[in-house]
Image: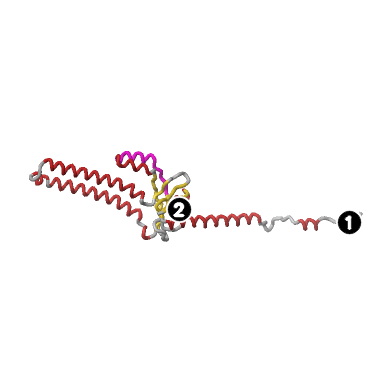
Amino acid sequence: MASIRLSRYEAEEGDLPDVCMCCGAPATERKRLRFTSHPLWVYILLPLGWLPYAIVAAVLTERVRCYTQFCPRHRNYWFMRTLITWGGFAGLLALIVVSVTITGLMHEHISKHITKSTQESVAGWLCVSSLVLILCWLISIPLMQLTAIHPADVTKDRLTLKRISPVFAEAVREYREERLAEEEHQDQRRNSRRRRPDAGQEVYDPEQRRRARPDPEAFEEDA
């Protein structure tokens, strides 16, 4: 995957070629999204807990609007990633609820065949496993963001768009060159129009002024 530096105008106004950001095919879907970006080191705080990560990320987060363009094949690019993230969370909750429910229903039957210490060990492993699964889900959120198309190094004037197709990056460069050549051509045409005199504008002609000058010998003959 590639990355490219865009101006805020290009990103926010969608002044980009009609090329899919994911595969480089002709783009048919244009969506203006609001991205959030913060330094990568913030993700190190996730093992310490969701709350420290959320607080630091909220302070350091930069928000930027950017147009994204996709072909029919990748039109659901963002929907699929959202579905994976929240679908995984729903599956995790369902697994925890089912495990606790089954353990509770079988408690009386299990208590007749195993010791109390074993029951406590099973309950402890169940709690630890649930916490580990929740932590894995929390870690998967930034991983999904980092492996998706996302902005980075956001400033007042520019941003870097990462995880894009190399074909899209090359198309942006060619589009800029064509746009620059067109602007230069228009400037040349405007400058030529300024230098060109209007039909009714008087033009300095030295030959005409010389012809219009009176003959001094004619005055001497009249005298």
Split into 4 quadrants, where in the image is the N terminus? Answer: bottom left
Residue 127: where, in percent of width, then height?
20, 43
Residue 153 falls left or right of residue 189? left
Residue 153 falls left or right of residue 141? right
Q: Amino acid at mark 1?
A: Glu
Say which residue appears at 30% left-offset and 41% top-offset: 47
The span picked out in magenta is 49-65
Residue 58: where, in percent of width, then height?
36, 40
Q: Residue beneath label 2, please?
A: 14
Residue 129: where, in percent of width, then height?
22, 45
Q: Amino acid at mark 2?
A: Gly
Lower sequence index among marks 1 and 2: 2
SS assignment at label 1: helix
Residue 64 painted magenta: yes
Q: Residue beneath label 1, please?
A: 217
SS assignment at label 2: loop
Q: Residues within 10 Å of mark 2 (few under 14, many from 20)?
A: some
Residue 149 falls left or right of residue 175? left
Distance Cα–Cα, label 1 vs label 2: 76 Å
Q: Residues within 10 Å of mark 1 (few under 14, many from 20)?
A: few
Residue 14 painted magenta: no
Residue 32: where, in percent of width, then height?
41, 52
